[in-house]
Image (tube, rainbow, N blue to C red):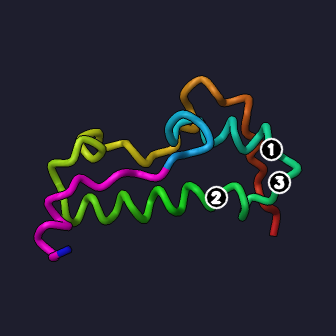
Amino acid sequence: MGQQAMQEETRKLPQLPVEGIKGFITHLKKNQETTVEELLKPYKAFEGELRKIYAQQPNHDAVQDGGVNLVPIFEGIEGASKFQALNF
């Protein structure tokens, strides 16, 4: 398949384990027995493909939402995360 034909095809984003990136923190909290490295794998694949879409298909539906890859930490899930100050 030629490069131009490949670019004309609409890229598809990889499936995430939860509905959208916004469910990441809840997913992280529900899977505390799994390493963060393992939990991040599908999100890294999602981000990699999203970067290609931004670069090659700026009119793609997925990138019309400027916050498509932002994890909301102050949107109704404040209790799901624990942040701790580091004392040096």
Q: Residue furthest left?
A: 4
Q: Is residue 64 left or right of residue 45?
A: left
Q: Is residue 39 left or right of residue 11?
A: right
Q: Is residue 6 above or below residue 75?
A: below
Label 2 with label 1: CB-CB less than 8 Å: no
**What residue would you read off at disc 3?**
34
Q: Is residue 39 left or right of residue 35?
A: left
Q: Residue furthest bottom?
A: 2
Label 1: which secondary element: loop
The earlier-in-sequence mark between 2 and 1 is: 1
Label 3: which secondary element: loop
Label 1 with label 3: CB-CB less than 8 Å: yes
The structure residue drawn at horizontal position 60% and vertical position 23%, both measured from the top left corner, is: 76
| Residue 10 painted magenta | yes
Q: Is residue 45 above or below residue 59?
A: below
Q: Amino acid at mark 3?
A: Thr
Q: Amino acid at mark 1?
A: Asn
Q: Which mark is residue 41?
A: none
**What residue would you read off at disc 1?**
31
**What residue would you read off at disc 2?**
40
Q: Amino acid at mark 2?
A: Leu
- Quadrant of image for the C terminus: bottom right
Measured as percent of width and height from the top left, residue 33 is found at 88, 50
